[in-house]
Structure formats: C-alpha cells, structure tokens
Image: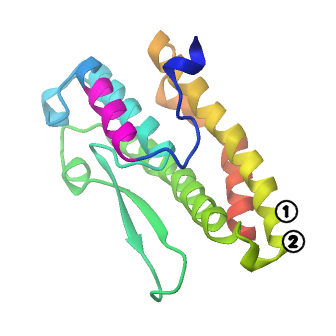
Amino acid sequence: EWLMKRPALVHSARGEEERRQRAALESNARTPANVQLSQLSLEEQEAVLLEDILFVLMGRQGTYIQASDRRISPYDLPIYDFRIDTNLKGDPAADPSLVRMVENVTNLCTFHRSVCAFVETHWRHDYGLVSQALCAAMQTLLGEYQVFVSQLETELRRGTLRISKLWFLMQPARETMHMLHCVA
C-alpha cells in the first residue's frame, strides 16, 4: 500500500509527477505558498521552512529556497547552488537562527544534486566499466539518501521534526554526500 502512495522514490521521476506532488502538499500545507514569513509566528515559520527543506533535499525548487545552476563551461556538469530567497534573508521578521539553519542544510542539497548529475552523466557505456561500477555504488547510496528523506517526511507529518532535530539527523548523510561530491 505504501508503494502505491509513493510510486516515485527514484530521482529520475520528475515532471508531471513532481508538479502533482507539490500541488498536493501545498494544498495540505498549513499556510499558502505565497505568504511572507513576516506574517507567520515563529512556529509557523519553522513548519513552512521544514516543508520547503524536504523539497530541496530531493533536489527540487522550494518556495523560499531556490536553486541556481552555475557552470564553469557549457561542457561541465551543472553545479546547483541552493540559496535562500533574498526576500527571506532580508525579512527582519524571519528568525535569524532559522535562516542560518536553512543555509546550513543547503550544503547537503548542493552535494546531492552534484552527485545526481554525475551519476546521470557517467552511468553510460561510453565512460567504461569502472565508471559504471562507481555510478552503481553511488546510486545505491542515493537510494539510501532518498529513504532517509522519506523518513524525515514521516517525522514532519507526525509533527515531531524540528530544524534542530533535522540538523542532528542529517549529519551522517551530509558526510556521505560530501565524500561522494568530492569523488564526483
């Protein structure tokens, strides 16, 4: 039953499915997606940012956290920098500690997107068997990462996830993604 509710846990499932899931979550959210954080209490700010973080952890755009694609040359792999929206950073009503914790989480998102881009590019036969084996091992770790994000989503839906708890729980995943990012 759970697999039928969440059929697309693989990274390659994007597009229409992503938009449908995003729309469903936004309709279930406590606040509308276009609300300024200054209009929310501290607890509501944290809840809205946590939902946004879950999207960003999967490599998607958030409401307050956006990705910018930067490349050194057109032939390089894309490097995605997830940054907090400037409206959030400049918002005096946004809690500075929440903003700082979200900035810390974005490093993991950048590492994740970099590894995903490497795997999507180098898994083909053109790059050789060693590269295929490396990408298969990375894909296994990416699958474990996606299970981790699903567990975080479950914690959020239960109401037991806070940004400080997220920061504590993501440390092993952050170290793993950082090492894979260095290899890629």
Residue 43 visible in the current orientation: yes
Q: Inspect the magenta stretch and tell me whether residue 24 lies in it.
A: yes
| Up/down of 113 relative to 64, above or below | below
Q: Residue furthest front?
A: 125
Callout 1 touching callout 2 (CB < 8 Å): yes
Residue 169 visible in the current orientation: no
Q: Is mark 1 on a helix, strand or loop?
A: helix
Residue 35 x/y as whole percent: 14, 33
Which residue appears at 38% of the width and 40% of the height? 18
Q: Is mark 2 on a helix, strand or loop?
A: helix
Q: In this view, does 58 lie to the left or right of 18?
A: right
Which residue appears at 49% of the width and 72% of the height? 78
Mark 1 to mark 2 CA distance (whole Å): 5 Å
Residue 6 x/y as whole percent: 52, 24
Which residue appears at 22% of the width and 22% of the height? 41
Q: Which amino acid does label 1 sit on?
A: Ala
Q: Inspect the magenta stretch and tell me whether residue 57 lies in it.
A: no
Bin the neighbour count of mark 2 within 10 Å (Cα to Cα): few under 14, some 14-19, many 20 and up: few
| Up/down of 44 relative to 62, above or below | above
Residue 173 x/y as whole percent: 69, 43
Disc sitting over residue 175 in the figure: none
In which quadrant will I find the N terminus? top right
Disc sitting over residue 130 in the figure: 2
Q: What residue type is labelled 2?
A: Val
Residue 137: quarter of image: bottom right
Magenta segment's dominant SS is: helix
Q: Is residue 62 left or right of residue 56?
A: left
**In this picture, which residue range is highlighted in magenta?**
15-26
Disc sitting over residue 133 in the figure: 1
| Up/down of 136 relative to 50, above or below | below
**Scheme by which the image is coloured:** rainbow
Which residue appears at 47% of the width and 20% of the height? 156
